[in-house]
Structure formats: structure tokens, C-alpha cells
Image (spheres, grey):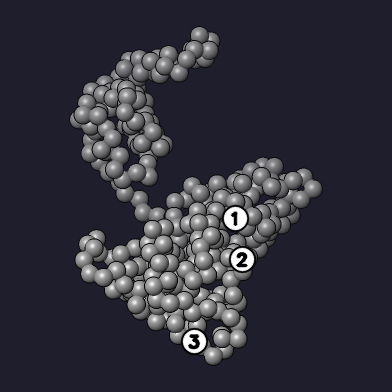
Amino acid sequence: ITEELRLGSVSIMVHQLLQDLKSGDRQASQSLVIVLDDFDLFAHPGKQSLLYSLFDLVQAQSTPMAVVGCTCRVDVKSLLEKRVFSRFSQRHIYLHGVPTIDAYVSVLRRALTLPEDNHVLKANPAFVKQWQQHVDEALANAQVLATLRRMFDLCRDLRPLLHLGMAALCRTTADRPHLLPADLYEVGLLQREDAKVNLLLGVSVLEICLLIALLQASSGGSGGAGEAANFETAYDHYKRLVLDPELRERSVDLFSKPVAYKAWEHLLDLEVIRHVDGSKKGPGEFRPVRLMLEDNQLNELLDKYAGLPKYVRHWGKQCLDI
């Protein structure tokens, strides 16, 4: 790389790179594989000149090269312009995410494990052993595992997981050179603030009770896994809770059905619950709905909600089998 290229713009360097690739020869040139991470960023409208040039070089077969694009977007082909799409080989390899929470945690453990071939670390095996012990203890912590489970349930993309590990490593210091469970847990709280849970912290106790009642009325739990229920069945569960003799002494109010249905409609507006069918036929009280919350989201809501009666929180935990 000449001094002129080093000080030049990106477009100049790309132009020179393409010229060098065009000057190659299939007999004498060494094979080249170009990997484009976040391939969808190169496919934005008006920014596909680089893709066009690279695909054109591959199709011309003047240089032994291949272009591999990596992306998390399944619809990335729809972003390509016609001239670029026509030069695409139409070869796809779909890689599925980690299937289990144990495999998910193992990825983070491998990322946090110190390399064995580092000559500096080989001179200090005691530190390596101690570091690995702290990593194992941190990943065995109940709060850390709950945080990782929540991330796994919401999104199995490994990039947030690796970002969590990197942010936790940045908390180590010269005085405290080891990883602690609090590092992973606190970073996880900062990174995984749930907007839906924060939104529900402002709803009424009645609406929290209806959510728990809907969870109880659905045979398979939340997250769309169980059977759909409707307002009438959820209200019956809520009514049985409030009329429990043990609960009357704790002053949990029984609201009338019209008032409860207004709260139900508010939950529909927030899209916390959603009608199973798209039609609007029939009375709203009998239309089946599903709870659009994961179990861990509802559990976090029960823990964070200020002023929630203890019996209601206990009822929700029982429905979640926690």
C-alpha cells in the first residue's frame, strides 16, 4: 500500500483493490475468499456498487476468488438490485442458533476461557487456573443463569451474548483481575431492559390480576404455548382468587365485570394480549386471546411491580411454577 493510498479516501482504496483483483490470473494467482460480515449493510439501496463489482469479478472467472456474505436477515435477497441479483450464485447455507440453554452458556464459557497457546499465560498457570475457576463460578450463579435464560428465550443471536461477556470483562481491574457473578448480572440488567415489562409497571393491579388469570386459564402457560382463553374464563379465575376467604382479610378488591373488561381492553391496546383470530366477529368477552409475554417477563414484572399485594405476587409465582 503506497502512502497515497494510505492517506486517500475509502473510494480510492476500493477502486485500487478492484483494479488489483482484475489484474489476477487463474493460473498464477492465489485463491482468495472475501467474507462480508453484516452482508445486509452492503445491500442498502444505492450502496451496492461494491457488491456488483465483486460479483462481476467472480462471474468473469478472471481471478480465482469467492465472496461469502454473512447476515442474520433471511430476506436479504430482496434487497439486492437486479444487476447484483443476476450475478448472485443463489447458494445459501442456513445456520441455526444454539438449540439448548446449556449450549448457549457453553458459547459464553468458551469465549471467556483464556487461550492455552499464549506464551505469556503459559508462564503463569496459577492465574489461568484461578481465572477459569472464577468463570465457572460466575456461570453457575443462579442470578447469572436466570439472566442468560432470559436472553436465550428472547433471542438466540450470539452477538448480544458475546457483547455481554465483553462488557463484563471491562469491569475487571488490576486490583481485581477476576470475573465475578455480579459483573455478568449487572451488565445483563443494563443490556436487557425489557420495554414491555417497563410499560406494564404503570398498569393497575386489576390488569396484573387479569394477566395472571389469563395465564392460569391457558393450559400450557404463556408465550403462546398453551390453549387460548377469553375474558370470561380469565374473569372467573380472578373472581375465585378475590373471593378466597384467606384473601378477604388482605383487602384485594373485586371489580365488576364492566370495569374489568375496560382493563382488558387496555391490555389489548398495549398488545400484551392479542386476539387469536383476525376477525372481529362475536362479542369481545368471548373472543379467544393469547398472552404475549414470556414466563420470565411476567416473573420480572411480579418482582418489580411496586405495591403489588403479596398474595397476588404469590398467585402469579404459583402459576409460573416458580
Residue denoted by label 3: 243
Report the mark closest to the observer, 1 or 3: 3
Q: Looking at the picture, which amino acid does disc 2 mark?
A: Ala
Q: Which residue is mark 2?
A: 306
* Mark 1 to mark 2 CA distance (whole Å): 18 Å
Residue under the point 47% across and 68% down: 207
| Mark 3 or mark 2: whose residue is earlier in sequence | 3
Instruction: Tell which tag, 3 or 2, sits nearer the viewer.
Output: 3
Q: Position of residue 27 (x, y in %)?
A: 29, 22
Residue, disc 1: 189
Classify residue 1 as left or right of residue 42.
right
Mark toward the start of the polypeptide (1 vs 3): 1
Nearest the camera: 91 or 248?
248
For this view, does 310 lie left or right of residue 27?
A: right
- Indicate the amino acid at tag 3: Leu
Q: CA distance from mark 3 to mark 2?
A: 23 Å
Q: Dot 3, how many residues are within 10 Å of its Cα: few (below 14), some (14-19), or many (20+)? A: few
